[in-house]
Image: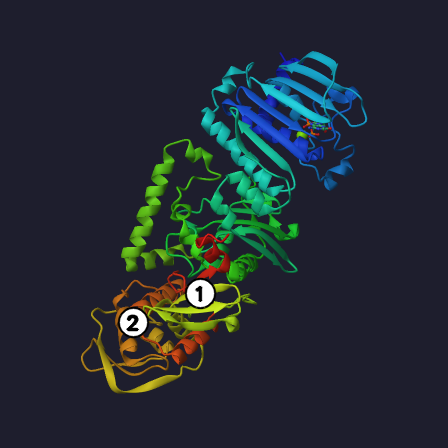
Amino acid sequence: MIKVLEKNIADKISAGEVVERPLSVVKELVENSIDASATSITVEIKNGGKSFIRVTDNGCGILGEEVEIAFLRHATSKIREISDLSAIDSLGFRGEALASISAVTRTTLITKTEKEKTGKKIVINGGEIIENSVTGCPDGTTIIVTDLFYNTPARRKFLKNDGAESGLIIDFLSEIALAYSKLKIQLINNGKIIFSTRGDGNQKNTLTSVYNRKEYRDLIEVNYNTDEYKITGCISKPSLSRTSRREQVFFVNGRVIKSKILDKGVNEGYKERLFEGRYPIVFLFIKVDPAEVDVNIHPNKREIRFNNEKSIIENVRNAIVETLSSKKSLVEFSDYYNPKTIYEKETPLFLHEEKSTDNIEQVDIKNILKSKRCESESKISINEEEKKTDNNIEEECKPELKLERPNHIPFNFEELQILGSIFDTYITCVDSNSFYLIDQHAAQERIFYEKLVSEYLSDTKPGQVILTPITVDVPISLGENSYNWLDSLRDMGYVIDNFGPDNSYIIREIPFFMEISEAENFVKYYIEQLDENINLRNSVVIDKLIMRSCKSAIKAHDKLSHQEKVALLNELSHCKNPFSCPHGRPTFLRFSIYDIEKMFKRV
Ligand code: ADP
Ligand code: MG
């Protein structure tokens, strides 16, 4: 027998589609507040939102005569005609949220518009109107939702523990606060303020408030504009990094997005500025023509497809490189002055599900092991790196390494005045408002590395003939691939040939800028890292090989004359990335006048 369901049964069923868990209630209510042009929203929850949710806003309110209508299914003020659908700019428009929420909870709504003298209070339990009365209240709307699923106990069973449910809500509201930095947002959990933003439109202030981390004050602001992209946000200096990507959050056109492509842009931007296994803190807000992205590839809309992946990688990279080349992003004494700020315990962000289970411990151990392994076993990590490289982005045939300099480096080397050096290791310099220590050896490594890569990349290979040729023995058969280790050394400017016994080779010419001992050591270390499985066509692999071999090969010139210091700084200034050695250690340490005055307690 077919029967039409009673209204309250039908409502409960459709409520299930909208209201899955406390987070869904908060999400719908907060979106309504934003749609109502609120500038201030307070959310209070108890027991993960299961027993109590209150959302208060200072938005437009609901007219007294329309309060009951708002709770009817398909009641909305946001669309009238089919044609409105295509031009929607509000977050919700299906007119189902209030009806659904009130069907499975006890709901109280108190609201007043600016033009009315009195407000309205309406109480609905499980879809039944219990009270509808006139009340005094401020402009705006407060909705209190208690006892979620009290009348559908089966649904309650699917909820997670309080911590996990509140975690989801905290994550959601954090994202909203960051995406809408002009909104004042406060979140209270079990009587405790989780965060409270100023709503001043400043992304850095908002970040600092949401995560309540002192060290976020030291993040550097990104401001990058091209015809196609506007990238803003905050990133950490290389001196502040983490063991995971947890503190890397991307908003694309206002929505939080997870994307390997964006990760890749960040990696390239920080390339050589961080040690392996370390990740910077990155909050980026990317605005791009909506026609250039497809957000519908994932039901949660957390993933996105970019039409032009290369271009987004390049622009994220440029935005970061440009930001990191400014004077304010040089590693400063104060970054290390208070070691606590650097080693402060890392707590997860946007991953509260993990936080409330035991996973967190495992994840960290995994990461630590991973970075340890990278440090100690060079071969393995090269092969891992090879695997990691994204296939569709990887360059084929001859590895295409790149040495790109950002469009402009805001740091002015010409202003630097060399004072001398200390411990025969650190060059001392000043400019108008800072004192600098420059690590000679790190600087030499950087210069050596860039010269080698640019020789490798250039068509002409200026070499120098050596009087006594160097001979090297290659311990194992390194394979006879079409592009093998011999070719790669020749591409760096070596003239090297097989000689006599099978595994002996003779070097007659070396790259123009090397000393003989450096050239010999370089080849030795280079060969030591090879095995028959290594893919020398992979740019990441060859880059790593060069980087590592440089480090071991370079001869430290301890005592430098003034001329040599001038020359070193000059060469450094021509480097694409002068501020760190290829392994991520800083070349520069900056002490601002302010830092120094602070130490002397003048300020
Ligand atoms: P929708 O948001 O899809 O229109 P809802 O059920 O969420 O449907 O809300 C129904 C209507 O109630 C909205 O269209 C809006 O007119 C009104 N409303 C809901 N919440 C608020 C609020 N916080 N401030 C002002 N009006 C609101
Ligand atoms: Mg809505």
What colouring does the structure picture have? rainbow
**Circle 1 sits on which residue?**
436
Q: Position of residue 190 (x, y in %)?
A: 51, 24
Q: On the picture, is 597 further left or further right than 555?
A: right
Question: Label 2's element?
Answer: helix
* Residue 363 vs residue 499, the one in the foreground: 363
**Circle 2 sits on which residue?**
553
Residue occupying image coordinates x 41% and y 52%: 337
Q: On the picture, is 254 further left or further right than 138?
A: left
Q: Which image quarter has ligand 2?
A: top right
Q: Can residue 400 be seen in this view?
A: no
Residue behind label 2 places its C-beta within 8 angstroms of ligand 2: no
- Give the answer, above or below, for where 129 lies relative to 170: above
Residue occupying image coordinates x 45% and y 24%: 161
Type of amino acid under label 1? Tyr
* Residue 194 vs residue 169, the one in the foreground: 194
Task: First in sequence, mark 1 or 2: give its number.
Answer: 1
Question: Label 1's element?
Answer: strand
Q: In which quarter of the image is residue 449?
A: bottom left
* Residue 488 vs residue 341, the one in the foreground: 341
